[in-house]
Structures are given as C-alpha cells and as structure tokens.
Image: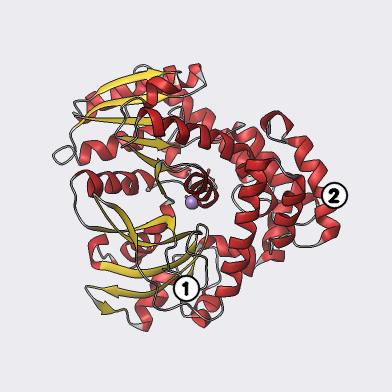
Amino acid sequence: GMKFTIVGAGSSYTPELLDEMAMRKEQLPVKEVMLYDIDEKRLGIMEGFCRRFSKKLGLDVEIRATTSLDKALYGADFVDTQIRVGGNKQRVRDEKIPLQYNLVGQETTGAGGMMKAFRTIPVMLEVAEKMEELSPNGWLINYTNPTGLVTEAVTRYTNANIAGFCSGGIFPKMWAKRALGIPYEQVQYDYMGLNHMNFISNITIDGRPVTEAEFEKIAAQNDDVDLELIKLLGVIPSPYLQWYYHTNEKVAKFKAAPKTRGEYVQDLEKDVYAAYADETNCEKPEALAKRGGGGYSEVAMGFVNAVYNNVDTKMVVNVPNKGAVSFLPDSAVVEVGCLVNKTGMQPLHVTEVPSMCWGLVAAVKNYEQLAVEAAVEGDVRKMKLALLAHPLVRQWEYVEKLVPELLEANKEYLPQF
Ligand code: G6P
Ligand code: MN
C-alpha cells in the first residue's frame, strides 16, 4: 500500500486531497495518510476532521498525525508540501510593505513574493534533504509558493525527486469547461513560461484548433487580464500577468481596498476552521470554495496516478528546462507541459514562443535565480540584485528603502540572513 504524507497538513486545503483520493480509490491503493504540521492545534483539528470525512467518503485509509518530520517522511511514497512559513500574518506584510511604495504587493511575485521565498526555501530544503535519506524513492509534490522558486532551489541544491505544481496548469481546461461545457480530456494547449508568468497558445478541442469565437469565450474567463489585450496578444496570459499589464490600475485598486487578500483569507480561515473543529460536521466547509487554490488536489492526484500506475499523462509541471524553452538555460526551472509517467517528467519542447513575451519571461527567470541564491546564501547583495532584476521593482530608489524594511519585517523567519 501507499504512504501519502502531507507536510503542512493543518492547511485548510487538506480535505480536498482526501476527496480526490476517494474519487481515484480504484486506481490508487493509499493505505496510510500521514498528516504533519508544526501547529499541534490545527493538526489535531484536521486529524479529527479527516477521520470523519474519510469515513463519510467511504475511503478506507489509515489517518495518522505527527509533529515529527522524520516520522512523517520515513518511507513515504509521496510527500505533498503545502506550507506557509510565518502564516498569513507574514503574507499580509508581503502585501502591505511594497504597496506603501506604490509597488505590487502580492504573496508570490514582486518584493513580497521574494520574501515568501526567503522564509520558505530553507524549510523546504530541509524537507528535501531528509527525503534523500528517509524516502529516497519518494516523490515530493510541491504546492508551497512561490512554487517556481521552491522547485528551482530544491532541484539545484538537493537530489530529491520534486515536481512543482500550481493549479494554474489546468486553468485553461477549467475555462473551456465553464465557457463551452467541454470536458477536460478534450482540451489541449501549449503552455510556456514560469510559474505565475506564463502564456497559453494553440488551444485545441478534440485535436482541432479553436475558432476565434471559442478563443474569445475561453479568454473571457480570465477575469484579471483585459479581454481586448488578450485578443491582441493572441495567446492567453496567466491571471498573474495582471500585475505586469495593468500595474498602475491594480496597485491603485489594492491600495484603496479595505483589506488585502491575506487579511480576507485570515477572516475566511476562522470560519473554515470553526467548521473543521465541529465534531458533528463531516462536510467540507462552504467558505473553502472562496480560496484560490481550488483544483490543486486534482492535479496532485493526477500526478500520483501517472507515476504510480505508469500512465502517460500530459501535465503542466515546474521542471528543469532541458531545452524545452529555447531562450532559457537548460537547468532553469520552467513551468511547461510535460509527459509524466513512472520515469518522472519530460518537458515537451515549446514550438511557438509568443513574440512579445520572451523578454518578460527571461527577466523574471533572471530575478528568480538571483532570489534563490540570496535565499540559500543569506546574501543581502544578491537580494538587492534580485530586486533590481525584477520588472515589478527595478528602481534603485525603491530597492534601497525596501531591503532593510523587508529584512526587519521578516527577521524571525530568516535564520540565514
Ligand atoms: C491561485 C494560485 C496559487 C495561490 C492561490 C491563492 O490558485 O495559483 O498559487 O496560492 O491562488 O489563493 P488564496 O485564497 O490564498 O488567495
Ligand atoms: Mn499558483
């Protein structure tokens, strides 16, 4: 039987993984689900809920919980990581500090995303290094953001098997389903770029290219980037391109908002956790559907199925480039379509690079590599270089002021600096 470990199991997303296991129970013999977290209170609540929920789902697995990372990782076949170092409290700081300078304040990109990477990468390297010893044949399925930088760090500095994911990989399928009622299996596309910095082209339905009208309907589902702009580009950018293509508008909007996304999520979490703690409840809380990470468990268990059962599956994964994106280094981690099976992931060569995007993708990769080095080495000089390389920061006047402020706001979580 399979041992499936969840690192950061106190996360409110955990039950979605059980849901997906139940849906695939004929194909996936999961014997043990090991919940690991450093927060004993949330872990205990989640353990109780997962027992009730798996019973309700008719899922015959042993639910266990531990605060020992070694016990959690030992002999695991798959380790799903979904941690948030410093919690939403630090997320809110990542959002607010850059906004003071009229810069994008976001948990995965810009200066805030970099700080999340600094807090997270040392912890993720520890998990990966322990897996090299305790579960050398296991797969690390990473959902911890910023997933591109985390995957870049783990592949560069350890030998653990890691696949980095974002629910964004299936967004075009979700959009096509919502817009045209077409099931996932019939929709294919080319996917090129980095995590939260990517472009979807050559969409086909049952192997035939979409019509212009279909393209527009699918594109209109991306609420964050203007439809006229998408039509002009001819490819669909990730919703995260809103920060690049609508920078001033979005900064103004988020500055004026009464709460940041992180503060909103903190409020939501109260309801979600109250529902999990209620011992008479065995249903997923409704408020969970208001979180952005929905769909990720589907991708995670799709990967488990592809690897465990050796089923060739096309999936979007963060992997070392190996020539898939011609203008980036072979070792750089990219987010592209891959063929996944028992042997791991093979990135599919990207034949068409949309003309206006390669410069942005290269600039952000440049930032990412510097940020990963800064995170590992605790190097303030590289931290400054990374911010100078980031298209959403870039100006020295900001970098000079931001660096001490960001370090101060994160000092409890940055032993490497
Ligand atoms: C999307 C992104 C994830 C991100 C999430 C945020 O799904 O792809 O990387 O973590 O949104 O959702 P939240 O509810 O925390 O704002
Ligand atoms: Mn994501």
Helix, strand, or loop for circle 1?
Answer: loop
Q: Taking 270 as reference, is 103 above or below it?
A: below
Q: In the image, residue 268 lies at what x, y percent?
A: 53, 35
Image position of 256 (left or right of 62): right
- Observer-nearest residue: 128 or 9? 128
Q: Does the residue at mark 1 contact the one at mark 2 (Cβ under 8 Å)?
A: no
Q: Which mark is residue 237?
A: none
Q: In the image, residue 362 lies at what x, y percent?
A: 58, 68
The quadrant of the rendering that contains the N terminus is top left
Helix, strand, or loop for circle 2?
Answer: helix
The type of residue carrying mark 1 is Ser
Of the numbered discs 1 and 2, the one sitting upstream in the chain is 1
Does the closest atom of ligand 2 sit within 8 Å of the Cβ of label 1? Answer: no
Name the image quarter holding residue 395: bottom right
Q: In the image, residue 301 lies at what x, y percent?
A: 29, 44
Name the image quarter holding residue 89: top right
Residue 15 in view here: yes
Name the image quarter holding residue 97: top right
How would you rate the neighbour count of disc 1 (Cα within 10 Å): few for under 14, some for 14-19, many for 20 or more?
some
The quadrant of the rendering that contains the C terminus is top right
The type of residue carrying mark 2 is Lys
Q: Taking 64 as reference, is 187 above or below it?
A: below
Q: In the image, residue 12 lies at what x, y percent?
A: 45, 32
Residue at label 1? 326
Q: Residue furthest left?
A: 26
The color scheme shown is secondary structure
Residue drawn at x 68%, y 30% is 415
Residue drawn at x 41%, y 46% is 294
How would you rate the neighbour count of disc 2 (Cα within 10 Å): few for under 14, some for 14-19, many for 20 or more?
few
Q: Which mark is residue 401?
A: 2
Image position of 16 (left or right of 9): left
